[in-house]
Image: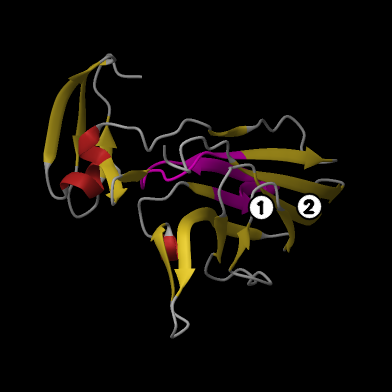
Amino acid sequence: MSKHQFPIALLITLSLISSFDSIQSATFTLTNQCIYPVWAGLLSGAGTPPLPTTGFPLQPSQSNSIPIPSSWFHRIWGRTLCSTDSTGRFTCVNGGGAAPPAILAEFTLNGANGMDFYNVSLVDGGNLPMTVVPQGESSGNCNVTGCVADLRQSELRLTMTTGDESVACRSACEAFGGCSIRQVSEFGDGGVDCGGNPKVTKKKGMK
């Protein structure tokens, strides 16, 4: 039995403190609710202040809080099966350098009209469950979002393995490259188009 068979989630708690209609401060608290170590990765968008760190390890049940600039955007993701060799080179089986397949939490704080935006994206595949939970004075009607399914046990053609262990689910565009796929699913006749600029198109009956 694989020691990575029963994940829970990488939990990201977004705490917001506001004054009138603008955010004055924010904190991301990352909690590893998986039963295995996860190495968090954080990347700031162009033109936004850098964060105090670009990543750190989280043991099971461990949390780490990061102060976030009041206007900030980009992504947080999780890496698994990471190690450092004798030369100091850090590598991960998946999620290293935000390379797919990796589930992404994407944020924009104080974006258009002073609004905050966030989502959990599987556009580049998925390597672990992830949930974002907004909290604080200005969380308003913001909802919990995320994906708590174990996507590693996915369609075999999309599975990324190391040895005999499934470690991630690739996106169709990564798995099949420059191609056009049409197949019948439980949602009806759907399609995925892949090319230089991958996109997903939904057909009638697809949810």
Q: Describe residue 175's horizontal placement relative to residue 120 as left or right.
A: left
In the rendering, which numbered label is found on residue 23? 2
List the residue tagged with mark 1.
109
Q: Is residue 183 visible?
A: yes
Circle 2 — which element?
Answer: strand
Circle 1 — which element?
Answer: strand
The span from disc 1 to disc 2 (Cα, nearest Å) is 8 Å
Instruction: Name the amino acid type tagged 1.
Output: Leu
Q: Is residue 65 above or below residue 117?
A: below
Q: Which portion, as a residue range, is magenta?
A: 106-131
In front: 99, or 187?
99
Give yes or no for residue 196 being in the magenta stretch: no
In front: 37, or 192?
37
In front: 41, or 117?
41
Residue 84 at x, y = what percent? Answer: 47, 74
Question: Which residue is drawn at the image coordinates 13% and 28% (left, top)?
Answer: 182
Residue 50 at x, y = what percent? Answer: 63, 72
Q: Is residue 55 above or below residue 122?
A: below
Q: Residue lying farthest bottom? A: 87
